Amino acid sequence: MTLKSTPRWMKTALEGAAKTTVAMPWQRGAHRAEMLARRKGSVAQAPVKRPSVAAC
């Protein structure tokens, strides 16, 4: 990436940086929450299955 000192380029670069810093944590948080929900779902289902298997 070449560094340009024109005001227009600097403005777009700053706006782009602001967008990425704001957007990335949201995407990460949503992805992480989805993964944790799946993990909790599989963990919650596993103890339910185990007693039924043990009872049989």
Image (spheres, grey):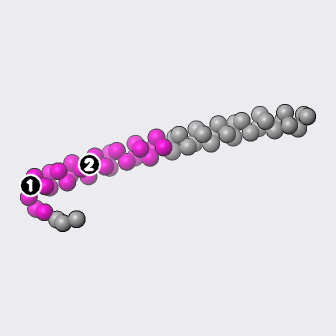
Residue at x-position 44% and y-position 46%:
28
Give above or below for 52 relative to 36.
above
Q: Which residues are magenta?
A: 4-31
Give above or below for 24 relative to 42.
below
Left or right of 14: which side holds 22? right
Q: Is residue 27 located in the magenta-colored stretch of the structure?
A: yes
Q: Which residue is mark 2?
A: 18
Residue 27, x across and y down, in percent: 41, 44
Q: Which residue is mark 1?
A: 7
Give the residue type that dot 2 points to.
Ala
Residue at x-position 71% and y-position 36%:
45
Q: Is residue 7 located in the magenta-colored stretch of the structure?
A: yes
In contact (CB < 8 Å): disc 1 and disc 2: no
In which quadrant of the rendered image does the C terminus lie? top right
Give the residue type that dot 1 points to.
Pro
- Tell me the quarter of the picture where residue 22 sits: top left
- Tell me the quarter of the picture where residue 10 sits: bottom left
Callout 1: SS: helix
> Which residue ends up furthest to the bottom in the rendered image?
2
